[in-house]
Image (cartoon, grey):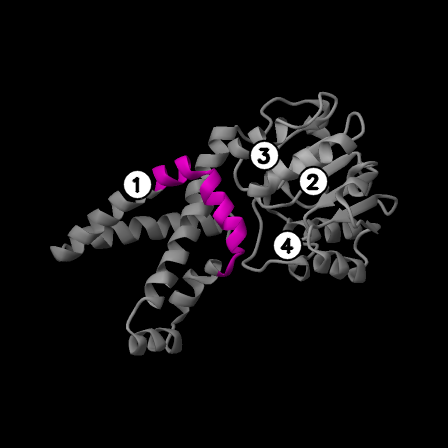
Amino acid sequence: MNSSFKKISILGLGLIGTSILHAIKKKLDKEIITFAYDIESDHRNIVSEMGIATFVCDNISEAVKDAELVILAIPVGAMETVARSISPHLKSNTLITDTGSTKASVIKDVNTYLPENVFFIPSHPIAGTEYSGPNAGFSSLFENRYWLLVSEMETENSDKLSNFFTKLGSKVERVSIEYHDRILAITSHLPHLIAYTIVGTASDLETDLKNDVIKYSASGFRDFTRIASSNPIMWRDIFLNNSEAVLEMLQRFNEDLSDLQKAIRKKDGKKLESFFSRTRNIRKKIIDAGQL
């Protein structure tokens, strides 16, 4: 399958970056040249051994100098530093995108350093697992998953990028910056925050009780806290850079939780059943829509 881009640079060789490399190699034109770079030499070595990139570069300037498309698959807190580093080495008309889970902060950090003849179109694949690192990547990660393009206007570059993501297996939708950050705050960021908090609460229990929580963890506890295994650096950066939207959703969650607390204290079974029935129906709609 042909791609509009013949030379693609992937910066960041974690789950998302290596999954993009796997998908390009499996699904796209064999003539595409890929350049891979990560600040961690161990990650570069693993990707070299995998053979999923045409070139694994030891410095970031070599990785981007000939690229037509550069994908920043790095923590959002590193965007500013990386944008500053690559800016002098980008050729004219290079297209830049990212895979970060926040957008307002990334746009500010990246656009500050890019030259006028380079184009930045933010994006975000709604795909992932609780695993991280180069060994976690796989080619089907993006299949039938939404890839959000933060570009409300259709342009030649945004169309090329949308076409590229579609060929990786994704369903592309265009969203605004504010909408992206608010919707991700409730669908991704807040659930991770809650999962991390519950694991933290369990770890603060008395020793005997804590040991039994670990020993007797039912599927509910294991399934709900699965995402607490995610990369701590990535999530630190997300909460620092999308704090306003996360705090808004956290306030709403706390209000709902307070209502449930009152219903339990008052033994209001009717209210509890009504709430659980409504949320169960919403969960069913999510599953029917193929998002879980």
Q: Which residue is drawn at 65% across and 28% down?
A: 113
Kindly report the distance in space between the C-alpha atoms of the residues bearing marks 2 and 4: 13 Å
- Residue 33, position in %: x, y? 84, 44
> Could you tell me the amino acid type at mark 3?
Glu
On the image, the x and y values in percent for residue 124 come to 59, 40
Q: Mark 1 points at which residue?
A: 251
Dot 3 or dot 4, earlier in sequence: 4
Q: Name the residue under label 2.
A: 71
Mark sitting earlier along the chain (3/2): 2
Task: Say which label, 2 or 4, has the lower sequence index.
Answer: 4
Judge from the rendering whether residue 158 lies leftward or rightward of residue 211; answer left or right: right
Tell me the residue that label 4 is attached to: 15
SS of the residue at dot 1?
Answer: helix
Which stretch did the figure color magenta? 229-249
Residue found at x 46% / y 47%: 188
- Mark 3 or mark 1, which has the lower sequence index? 3
- Dominant secondary structure of the magenta stretch? helix
* Image location of residue 119, percent across then percent down: 70, 26
Q: At label 2, which amino acid type do we have? A: Ile
Compared to residue 288, the image places residue 177 above or below, namely above
Q: Earlier in the sequence, mark 1 or mark 2?
A: 2
How far, Cα to Cα, is label 1 from label 2?
A: 34 Å
Mark 3 vs mark 4: give the one in front: 4
Q: How crowded is mark 3: few (under 14 residues within 10 Å), some or many (20 or more)?
A: some
Q: Is residue 82 magenta?
A: no
Query: Decide: marks 3, 4 in contact (CB < 8 A)?
Result: no
**Amino acid carrying mark 4 in the image:** Leu
Dot 2 lies on which element? strand
Query: Residue beneath label 3, please?
Result: 173
SS at mark 3 in the image: strand
